[in-house]
Image (spheres, helix red, strand yellow):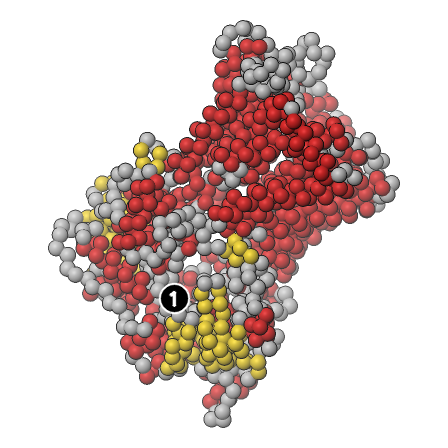
Amino acid sequence: MTPMTNDSLAELAGKAASQTPVEPRLSLQHITKRYPGVVANDDVSLSVMPGEIHAVLGENGAGKSTLMKIIYGTVQADGGQLMWNGRETVVANPAAARALGIGMVFQHFSLFETLTVTENIALALDAPFDLKALAVRVKSVSEKYGLPLDPYRLVHSLSVGERQRVEIVRCLLQDPQLLILDEPTSVLTPQAVRKLFETLRQLASEGVSILYISHKLHEIKDLCDSATVMRGGRVTGHANPKQETTGSLARMMIGRDLPVCQSPDYTGNNNCALEVRNLSATSIDPFGVSLQDISLRVQRGEVVGIAGISGNGQAELLAVLSGEQTVGNDAVLLDDVPVGKLDAGQRRDLGLAFVPEERLGRGAVPAMSLANNAMLTAHRQAGMKHYGLLNYAATREFAKRCIERFDVRCNGAQSAARSLSGGNLQKFIVGREIMQSPKAMIVAQPTWGVDVGASAFLRQTLIDLSRSGVGVLVISEELDELFEICDRIAVLSEGKLSPAMPKEQTNAESIGLLMAGKAEKEVA
Amino acid sequence: MPLLEPRANPSVVMQWAAPLIAIGLTLLVGALLFYSLHVSPLKAFYVFFIEPLETSNGWSELVLKASPLILIAQGLALGFRARIYNIGAEGQLLVGAICASGVAIYSNGAETWWVLPGMVIAGAIGGAFWGAIPAWLKTHFNAEETLTTLMLTYVATLLLSWLVSVPWRDPDGSNFPQSIMFNDSALFTLLFDGLRINTSVFITIAAVLIFWVFVSRSFTAFQISVGGQAPAAAHYAGFSSRKTVWLSLVISGLTAGIAGAGEVAGPVGQLTLSLSPGYGYAAIIVAWVGRLHPLGIVLSGILMAMIYIGGDAGQVSLQLPSAITGLFQGMLLFFLLGADAFVNYRLKRRKPRALIKEATA
Amino acid sequence: MIESFFVHLIPILIGTLGAATPLVFAGLGELVTEKTGVINLGVEGMMLIGAVAAFAAAVATEGNLAVGLMAGALAGALASLPFGILTLSLGANQAASGLALTIFGLGLSAFIGQGFVSYSLSGVKPIAIPLLSKIPLLGPVLFNQDIVVYLSFVTFGLVAWVLAKTRLGLVLRAVGESPEAAHSIGYPVTAIRYGAVLFGGAMAGIAGAYLSVVYTPLWVQNMTAGRGWIAVALVVFATWKPARLMLGAYLFGGVTILQLHAQGFGVAIPSQLLSALPYIATIVVLVLISRDRKLLQLNLPASLGKPFIAGG
């Protein structure tokens, strides 16, 4: 492994620019991959030229990630061919992929929290083991591409954006000819997205091919030279995104227009449903962020959003709001009643509902039936238990009503929670909470990993809930989502919360600046 | 290449087939073992599992051994559902036996009605206390209950050893480390003349019924299961993990303590070093093989009792080593855990040949 | 005065090293296993199987120590295999599987050992290392020991070096930290964990071999008497750091030996209760270290105890 020299880069760039027909860097032909009960990739073909930024566009579950895993060798295809620089190639495993010059930046980073930046990078390099020399290279490469990194920092002390840099630098050190990025902007501020795009364009100009996986239409229009659109495991079209509208791309992606939420006016009383006053709390997690002097009001009839990148105190704020961590009694008020010292169960008794980010394992017990999962929080409803004994008929009845009312696709109340798709399980959990007629409801990442149809349903459900006189608080990393459903938006960064602004008085740009906080500014 | 893939829904069939498969495999390996020891497997199985049941005494012994196993396993199973691994039931049994014996010894041979109930209550309290220590260590200091319960078992064994060697040693017992023999008011009544089976089995029967209702219907048992399967979900729902720890360890200590009282006030009749043939450990296996289900535990308790009795019989009639009992117990648990994998996973179907060729051509 | 102090102290310290050596081997093995995210509660069982196998091999070769140790290591590794299959290939609960291994090991070792109860071995003579053994106090304690004690020093050095300084160590730590991430960048997580489990088994086997061939040297049923469990506890006490593990092992060796000497000095506590000291000490030590949740969380291999079965 030799570091990429300027000469070889120039040569590559020259090749890309010249008019002579060049062979595709990567060409997939008729790739098929089946899992039990689902065809993840069905006859997928695409090709990427040297120096090309190629988008793979599709919503959650369209088969993009499986396709990338096949290219990177983590998963083997059942059928089809992969051509690498014109030669038919079998990528047996990620090490083989790296040897070919394929680098991958994972959506859920493949980093190790308790190891340093250099150690993390060393793990993915097949070079001789010399951490000191590597640290020097990490520093120089990271600076060259505008991705500054301290090679000796432990990963758990890095911000999410910095972690992504580690992943990218890790790929760059292997002289990649093809770089795959899987939903890279889901954790970035708008400003950081622009910086990333600069880096990617620089790489492309040096001849590196880029496969850019995303479901964000405007980003793809902004960055990519060409796009392959996938739906339900199949390719539904190839396009030049610069010549398409977001509407036409959306139709290729989901087969119809993007659904739009309706936010009607609210006329009922707007008493305070949930209030946080000067809340400070130390994190229980040694890698966590402590909350500093947070104040927030959520009124009946409105949806308030908290923007920010996970790891800035989101988990801690949720724990304190839900009652999983207790604080001073007057720090949290539910319907003007101080509840800071009450535990999660007691707060629910008073009308607080909560939908956690992690659906399987927190919002629901994976191996238990939906009926039993309903009992996690619905046991306090009338008729569910007598003298400490459960009424199973009532439980099933509750689950059935929830399934019908919230359009949960499953095999009835007895199906295990883990057998449901992310969107359907989320509908069940949200439904379970709404059916308890809460006064205030907190929802974390409501549509994370959920397909477009279910997302639209969930968003509309939350708006409707608020308009029925409930205070709804949404914590999300997706700015688009917050602007779609919220009436006011605040930003949580480094454990501090900005004042909630009516959404008409703010925009993605200024929210992004608040999200970046001071850590990013220091580096920039 | 992984061999397994997860099932969407846990397999109900495998849930109950797994113990049967485990028993079958244990018997199979047992047959091979007997064969290698130059004992006809058929003869050995006859001696192990049939012969002891040809007499009324055999049945009496079976129930007598199954009873404490079932009782202890009921308590343990509750904790295992919560993933609280009390592996020190043996120690809790011993402390229960010690406390019960204390009542018998200090009541000084009084021929009154309250001695036996007093012993059972003292045993229950003693066992519960020995279970409460690890519960306290876990809830207040976050100390692993697996290790603390086990360490406390060694402490209990040494405590017992001291008691029967020094303060409670039978002065007329020719220096053997054992207490006086208890008189009738400190013993459970025999059910039949000439057989050792006694009224303590009714405690076990009552316990099975109570646990059955508790586990299948109570909200507390539901909370315990949630805590075991998904601790974060229990936290989310506001179910107290401390309560679960205390309940699991105190209740399992309590049942083990009563079982200990049942031994000293039953077939053993005094406090000795060898009052339990490892019931506290065997009950762990009983709980698992019985699927942590109160009725399943009854069946697996009887099976485990048969292994005990068969081991004794094998030693007498076939001169097989006594350690064979422990070997069977360990194998049974191994095979069960292996078969259990198929409740939540299934074998991955191999790819059709043609496709592999296509992919690598 | 000072001389007589040494006269008492030196045998205690020498004994401490001997008593600690099985804990060192078993503890280091378990530490490596746990570093990859697998907790094996079967150490006690693997030690017993190692002990009986080593004893049998040593008896058969008229007390050949090397053969005994190798037999112990091999038997321990073999004993860990069913645990590996259950937890790594079949995704079984690690706590239950380890427990099963201990119960099985107790039974199997007793079964095999029944034929060896009446045998005894001559033991192993200490080897004084020239010059070093002449250092006052330290010399006789550290450098006039049997060869297995020296082997335990070497093993410690190797384990500490590999974990801290080599690529292999980095990979082991990475797998324990996040098997998902290790898998996604192409490491064979299950195979690596198998290796660690087998290593843990072999080390527990050597620990058992030391007990039956060098320390006692006899075969007695259930002769490990909880040392396997203490080794597991020591790994927690050590917060998964080899040097702290050594410290813990010697502390325990010390408690064990002191307790024996106390009986000799005529301390007025019944011997049975003194014998309970190491077990009580284990609990105390666990409590002291576990109460600091943050310290544990910072050092705990993040995936410890969680099954990982690669998808795809």
Q: Residues within 10 Å of mark 1 (few under 14, many from 20)?
A: some
State the residue lying farthest toward the right: C62
Q: Is residue B113 left or right of residue C98?
A: left
> Where in the figure is residue C295, as x and y percent of width and height?
51, 45
Q: Residue at x 44, y 32 (%)?
A: B212
Q: Residue at x 37, y 54 (%)?
A: A411
Name the quadrant containing residue B191.
Answer: top right
Write down the quadrant of residue B110 in the picture: top right
Residue at 48% x, 43% y is C293
Q: Position of residue B297 (x, y in %)?
A: 52, 34
| Residue type beneath disc 1 | Asn
- Residue at 39% of width from left, 43% of height from top? B235
Q: Is residue A462 left or right of residue B251?
A: left
Please state the total of marks drawn on the protein image.
Answer: 1
Query: Vertical placement of B185 versus B348: above or below?
Result: above
Q: Indicate the position of residue B4 as horizontal and vertical percent values.
A: 55, 57
User: Which residue is label 1 attached to?
Assistant: A60
**Is residue A471 visible in this depiction of the protein?**
yes
The vertical placement of C226 against A166, above or below, is: above
Q: Is residue A157 above or below residue B16?
A: below
Q: Nearer the viewer, residue A140 or C61?
A: C61
Helix or strand or loop: what does disc 1 sit on? loop
